[in-house]
Image (cartoon, grey):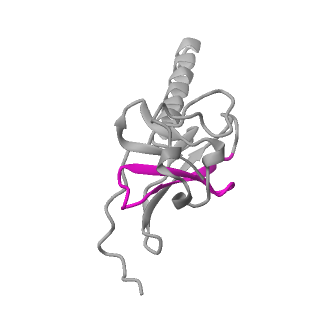
Amino acid sequence: MLSQVGKMALVGLAVAMLSQVAVDQAEAGYGGRQYYSSWSYQPSRSYHYTRYYYRPVVSSPNYSYHYCISYPSQPRYVYYYNPSSQQYWGRYDLQGTEGANYSLLAKKDRKKNLEDIPESAFPPPAAMPAIPGSKDGVAIEPIKEKPADEPTDLPATK
């Protein structure tokens, strides 16, 4: 028979184990405040994309998302696109210096089409901006992996 102290120790161990599972899931990208999906290729538009999922508020039960788009013609950059406003709002420099690799466009320079944004509109890279819509100033986690090369096993398009 377990003593009261033994029972408390078992409860403490169970809580610790469940907490570790939650931390492991968050670190794996699920259940955390923000994460990226895996990269996909859009053959009709010739670009790779991933979704950046985030919670503006920690306690929010639902995620919002933006797209991150990588064009083969500009492999150095990943462009952030807001599907709600239908605007590109910045870019991440994959070859930039850690901590200074994000160019946040001024609101006046955000456009629906990337071709409509002159190169001069992108400011020098700086730190990652805050999670969209957040009030606590937590920065967006940078992309950790580059998009893969175009798959060779996709069907041909007409």
Note whether residue 63 is visible: no
Against 23, is 74 above or below? below
Q: In the image, what residue occupies the spot 70% across and 39% down?
A: 60
Magenta range: 62-87
Instruction: Name the residue rendered at 33%, 58% in the picture.
Output: 148
Q: How many marks?
A: 0
Considering every residue shown, the one lying at the far top of the view is 5
Q: Estimate the x, y position of residue 43 in percent, counting from the top left.
A: 43, 73
Q: Position of residue 97 (x, y in %)?
A: 36, 33
67 magenta-colored: yes
Q: Residue at x 67, y 34 (%)?
A: 134
Residue nearer the viewer, 43 or 18? 43
Of 51 and 94, which appears nearest the observer?
Answer: 94
* 108 sits left or right of 46 in the view: right
In the image, farthest residue toward the left = 152
Is 48 located above or below residue 104 in the figure? below
| Residue in view at x 61 percent, y 41 percent | 106
Residue 54: in sight, yes or no? yes
The quadrant of the rendering that contains the C terminus is bottom left
